């Protein structure tokens, strides 16, 4: 892939200029970042209509809040991903009763192996995280990944994987602490 | 045993991971606003975990989403992507206009005249409230049949001969106004009927001067808002015979129940 650093800088620049009200930059930011964010939304949402709305809300918020983006603190992609995931999770919590026991969601439990990052943007960070994830025990790794992608609560995850709530909490908590130790080392 | 600091650190990690229930989540969200150490810890976890999205496949959002965002924000910027210089410019689409019309009319006349095929409960009235199009593949086979229900602003698209596409691709239906650029009507199914809503702008463009076409696009639809893949079928739009309008829709929709001719 092409230079990760320059792609990252370009995306940062687009987000910064969006914060100044530059519509062309906002349009270009959408063109570049929306496919990845839509993938994130689809993975989390109950259906396409939900994913559409989450992506739409995300970009409306991007336009309003881009001025608060500080490239010194986070990359544009991390900022955008966080925003999209938070929108998606909040929406899932609103519909919690409906999603509980939703048989369709069982299908998403397949522990897909990470596919190579489609964009080069986050590939270096991703490689590092992937190595640290590999060091976890299989259940920990699987639970952390599933939690991140699905946005499900502890309770929902425990029900889906058919393990006691305490077991799920301990898998994920130990997984998170180990990840931190590995990533910060 | 965990110390209070560790407990908090875990709560922040759990918040970012997304496993907290609504109440616990709201509590952390408040702390982020009021406690700098909470904001810092959460930001650090976001940086640690965000790269996980690297393994998520990119899916181009459907073209109407950008239009919706633009409208919601009342932006005046027009295009987000340069117009695709594509087959659309070189293909003489207009060649097909008029060719399918006769076939559709003939098929409808036949179907309507066969007793028993018409849904007995089919509503009668509002003549000319329907338009139809036979969307043909290059080999002449009917790819899809589209019936436009003008009154209810919707289009029912029924597959004829199933079209094979490579994995990760799906057919997208386009309305091509005379002399204009294709407008995405929506993604359509290959093996069952699809009902698509028609907005006012699209309704205004329907008619014998417009055509329909199907192109092969990524699952989420064309990433550019214009066709990006091969055009696999095209059809002219024709007004359905007046008195058979309402029947037309039910007959065509009902065709899914039996093998196509």
Image (spheres, coloured by chain):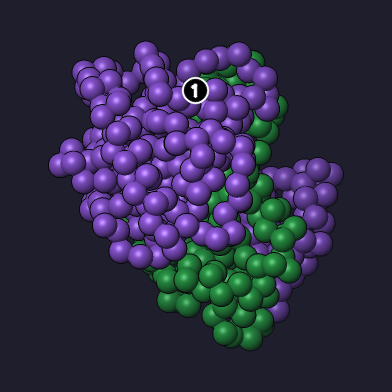
Chain colours: A green, B purple
Residue A162 vertical position relative to residue B155 in the rendered view, above or below: below
User: Between residues A96 and A158, which one lies in front from this camera angle?
Assistant: A96
| Label 1 chain ID | B
The quarter of the picture where residue B81 lies is top left
Location of residue A146 in the rendering, given as x and y in whole percent from the top left corner:
51, 66
Query: Does residue B140 appear left or right of residue B66 in this picture?
Result: left
The structure residue drawn at horizontal position 77% and vertical position 61%, both measured from the top left corner, is B22
Quarter of the image where the C terminus of chain B is located: bottom left
Secondary structure at numbered mark 1: helix
Location of residue B92 in the rendering, given as x and y in whole percent from the top left corner:
22, 20
Decide: few, some or many residues near mark 1? Use Cα within 10 Å; few <14, some 14-19, many ≥20.
some
Query: Does residue B248 appear left or right of residue A147 in this picture?
Result: left
User: Between residues B99 and B64, which one lies in front from this camera angle?
Assistant: B99
Quarter of the image where the N terminus of chain B is located: bottom right
Residue B14 vertical position relative to residue B216 in the rendered view, above or below: below
Query: Does residue B171 appear left or right of residue B119 in this picture?
Result: left
Q: Is residue B59 visible in the rendered structure shown here?
A: no
Q: Is residue B38 visible in the rendered structure shown here?
A: yes
The structure residue drawn at horizontal position 71% and vertical position 73%, both measured from the top left corner, is B2
User: Between residues B133 and A14, which one lies in front from this camera angle?
Assistant: B133
User: Please, which residue is most extreme toward the left here?
Assistant: B139
User: Between residues B106 and B38, which one lies in front from this camera angle?
Assistant: B106
Location of residue A60 in the rendering, given as x and y in whole percent from the top left corner:
66, 32
Numbered disc total: 1
Location of residue B207 in the rendering, given as x and y in whole percent from the top left corner:
45, 25
Residue A67 vertical position relative to residue B57 in the rendered view, above or below: above
The structure residue drawn at horizontal position 80% and vertical position 55%, both measured from the top left corner, is B26
The structure residue drawn at horizontal position 21% and vertical position 46%, both measured from the top left corner, is B141
> Mark 1 = which residue?
B205
């Amino acid at each position: 892939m092409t230079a990760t650093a320059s792609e990252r800088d370009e995306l940062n620049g687009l987000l910064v200029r969006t914060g100044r009200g530059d519509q062309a930059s906002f349009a270009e930011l959408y063109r570049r970042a929306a496919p990845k964010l839509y993938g994130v939304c689809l993975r989390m949402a109950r259906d396409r209509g939900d994913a559409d709305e989450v992506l739409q809300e995300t970009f409306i918020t991007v336009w309003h809040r881009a001025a608060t983006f500080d490239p010194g603190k986070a990359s544009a992609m991390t900022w955008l991903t966080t925003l999209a995931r938070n929108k998606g999770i909040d929406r899932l919590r609103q519909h919690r009763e409906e999603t509980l026991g939703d048989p369709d969601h069982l299908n998403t439990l397949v522990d897909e192996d990470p596919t190579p990052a489609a964009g080069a943007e986050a590939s270096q960070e991703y490689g590092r995280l992937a190595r640290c994830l590999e060091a976890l025990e299989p259940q920990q790794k699987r639970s952390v990944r599933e939690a991140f992608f699905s946005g499900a609560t502890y309770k929902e995850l425990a029900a889906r994987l058919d393990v006691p709530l305490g077991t799920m909490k301990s898998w994920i908590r130990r997984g998170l602490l180990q990840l931190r130790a590995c990533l910060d080392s | 045993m965990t110390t209070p600091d560790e407990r908090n650190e875990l709560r922040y990690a759990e918040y970012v991971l997304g496993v907290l229930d609504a109440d616990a989540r709201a509590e952390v969200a408040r702390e982020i606003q009021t406690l700098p150490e909470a904001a810092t810890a959460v930001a650090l976890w976001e940086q640690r975990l965000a790269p996980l999205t690297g393994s998520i496949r990119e899916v181009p959002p459907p073209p109407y989403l950008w239009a919706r965002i633009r409208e919601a924000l009342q932006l005046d910027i027009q295009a987000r992507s340069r117009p695709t210089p594509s087959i659309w410019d070189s293909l003489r689409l207009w060649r097909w206009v008029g060719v399918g019309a006769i076939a559709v009319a003939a098929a409808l006349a036949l179907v309507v005249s066969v007793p028993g095929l018409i849904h007995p409960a089919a509503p009668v009235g509002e003549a000319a409230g329907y338009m139809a199009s036979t969307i043909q593949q290059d080999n002449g086979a009917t790819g899809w049949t589209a019936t436009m229900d003008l009154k209810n602003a919707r289009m029912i698209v029924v597959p004829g001969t199933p079209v094979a596409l490579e994995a990760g691709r799906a057919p997208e239906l386009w309305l091509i106004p005379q002399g204009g650029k294709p407008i995405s009507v929506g993604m359509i199914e290959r093996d069952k009927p699809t009902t698509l809503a028609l907005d006012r702008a699209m309704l205004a463009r329907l008619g014998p001067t417009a055509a329909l076409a199907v192109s092969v696009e990524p699952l989420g639809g064309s990433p550019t808002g214009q066709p990006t893949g091969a055009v696999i079928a095209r059809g002219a739009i024709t007004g359905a015979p007046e008195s058979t309008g309402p029947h037309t829709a039910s007959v065509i929709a009902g065709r899914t129940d039996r093998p196509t001719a």
